[in-house]
Image (cartoon, grey):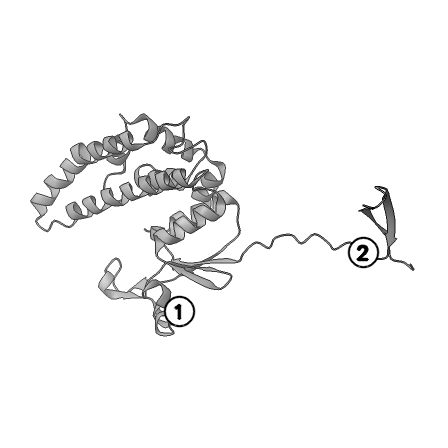
Amino acid sequence: GGSSSSVFLLLNNTENNNTTLIATDRAPSPATAPTMPSYKLHYFDIRGLGELPRWLFKLAKVDFEDHRIGFSFGVPGDFSTIQRPEFDSMKAAGELDVSLGKVPFLEVDGKKIGQSKAIERFLAREFGFMGADSVEAAQIDQLCETVIDFKNAYQKVKGIQDATEKEAAMKKWFEEDLPANVALAEKSVPPGPGPFLVGSKVSLADLVWYSFLAAPKGYFYDDNAEGAKASMDKCPRIKASTEAVAQIPELQEWLKTRPDTFM
């Protein structure tokens, strides 16, 4: 009645098997669109452990607040003189408890998640970058864990104190150890159509390997970026994956426009 629209409900009359249209005055309930969560990533104003989560947001075309915590040095480059008042106040207030007094941490509708790898896997699952099923998700996880193993091995080389010994070890790492490790990883890649490492679309594993070996200002940026790229020359699956990731428009745009930070 009045100005409200009549809505016709289709009812089945089970007694005489007739279908009856009944007019009502109830307006239809508007379809409730799912609400996109609110995301806020807290990290220093550097690439570091915050960069993979940023890539995932950009590839998924999902808005997020990129909270970059500033810092400065009393003596440029001397980490013993670092000054980070915002970080210190956040830590004192207990805001970093979820992440053991460190960053990054991610807020999802105000709920906090710590640990960079947990954040990466969470976002990859949310945005569809963890494979088509649980087996593919585990294979993606496997390839990401392999990179962690290789990074740990490299940090032992970087940690050598004697300058002459370290120089020889670094040379051996890029000429022998890293190529041998990447060749081992190549054998572990599951069969698939390519160019991506698992399944038919880009996943967290592709982004992790691209970041590790091929990204501009990536993991080996300060040491031997060209040596890192050369390590996959005889590994067609891994090389094809990194080349495919490099062509993703959303990632290309981010790499061109992201803040230019020193690390």
Q: Residue at x 8, y 49 (%)?
A: 162
Image coords of residue 135 (percent x, y): 39, 38
Image coords of residue 167 (percent x, y): 12, 42
Direction from residue 59 to residue 146 in the image, left or right: left
Direction from residue 201 to residue 185 in the image, left or right: left
Image coords of residue 44 (percent x, y): 37, 58
- Depth check, mark 1 against mark 2: the one in front is 2
Q: Residues within 10 Å of mark 1 (few under 14, many from 20)?
A: some
Residue 183 shows up from this direction:
yes
Considering the numbered disc 2 on the image, is that residue within a helix, a strand or a loop?
A: loop
Give the vertical position of 111 relative to 56 (above or below). Answer: below
| Residue lying farthest to the front in this orientation | 15
Count of marks placed on residues: 2
Q: CA distance from mark 1 to mark 2?
A: 46 Å
Image coords of residue 5 (percent x, y): 86, 54
* Relative depth, front residue between 17 and 131: 17
Q: Disc 2 marks which amino acid? A: Ala
Picture quadrant of residue 131: top left
Q: Residues within 10 Å of mark 2 (few under 14, many from 20)?
A: few
Give the vertical position of 207 relative to 126 (above or below). Answer: above
Direction from residue 101 to residue 64 in the image, left or right: right
| Residue with the mark numbered 1 | 95
| Residue with the mark numbered 2 | 27
Mark found first going from the N terminus, 1 or 2: 2
* Relative depth, front residue between 179 and 217: 179
* Relative depth, front residue between 176 and 4: 4
Q: Name the image quarter holding the N terminus.
A: bottom right
Direction from residue 135 to residue 159 in the image, left or right: left
Q: Disc 1 marks which amino acid? A: Glu
Residue 6 shows up from this direction:
no
Picture quadrant of residue 140: top left
